[in-house]
Amino acid sequence: DARVTQTPRHKVTEMGQEVTMRCQPILGHNTVFWYRQTMMQGLELLAYFRNRAPLDDSGMPKDRFSAEMPDATLATLKIQPSEPRDSAVYFCASGRANEQFFGPGTRLTVL
Amino acid sequence: GENVEQHPSTLSVQEGDSAVIKCTYSDSASNYFPWYKQELGKRPQLIIDIRSNVGEKKDQRIAVTLNKTAKHFSLHITETQPEDSAVYFCAASLPMYSGGGADGLTFGKGTHLIIQP
């Protein structure tokens, strides 16, 4: 049963530090998404890639967030510098056709 | 962009009864409407979806209906069981890019479904 994997599962860091989150999509899926979940805002789309090309990053704060997909088996989301308001669960999802399947998430706490 | 409203925010039903969660969307061009179930501390799990060319879809105890004219869709769970307790999210997707593949989802705020024994 293929699943999206994410590392790390939990990350606690101090304000100003760089944070990198990694995602391995399901083999054969051509689209990879990054979402963020908070109590206040719910689930929000940050960015997504299709066939490794960035399609949309309009949901992402451009000044501190960056997303890349260096190869078909790895997507990364980087925050530099991190701020307390970035504390959230960050989910990666992958899909083909319409369906999207979520990874377990990275719970980020910025102190 | 798309906007999805979901009601109610909390729904408590007796075990064995039915539960209905409703969502509305704003952009008539949206063409894909999935529902996700999320248990505490877990990932959202796709439970059922419907495309805009279909009015209703059923999978065992769950069903989804879509009214394109009114721009609303609903999740129906029959014969509810304790394991149905979770937060349920509806979502909508606009076809933004060609080339085949999924597009980003706009989610509702979620419904906390509580099944009373």
Image (cartoon, grey):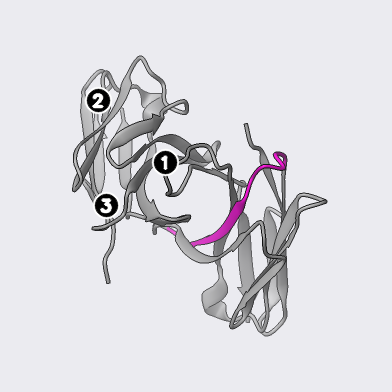
Which chain does the numbered disc 3 sit on?
A: A
- Residue at position x 63%, y 82% in the image: B117
Q: Picture coordinates of residue B99 (x, y %)?
A: 42, 43
Q: Quadrant of residue B44?
A: bottom left
Q: As displayed, is residue B114 above or below residue A103?
A: below
- Mark 1 against mark 2, which lies toward the viewer? 1
- Residue at position x 48%, y 44% in the image: B103
Measure the C-alpha gap from mark 1 to mark 2: 22 Å
Which chain does the numbered disc 1 sit on?
A: A
Q: Which numbered disc covers residue A14?
A: 2
In what quadrant of the picture does the N terminus of chain A appear?
Answer: bottom left
- Residue at position x 30%, y 34% in the image: A53
Q: Which residue is identified by label 3? A: A25
- Mark 1 against mark 3, which lies toward the viewer? 3
In the image, what residue type sits under mark 1?
Answer: Tyr
Residue A48 visible at all: yes
Q: Which residue is identified by label 1? A: A35
- Residue at position x 56%, y 70% in the image: B85
Which chain does the numbered disc 2 sit on?
A: A
In the image, what residue type sits under mark 2?
Answer: Glu
> For residue A73: magenta?
no
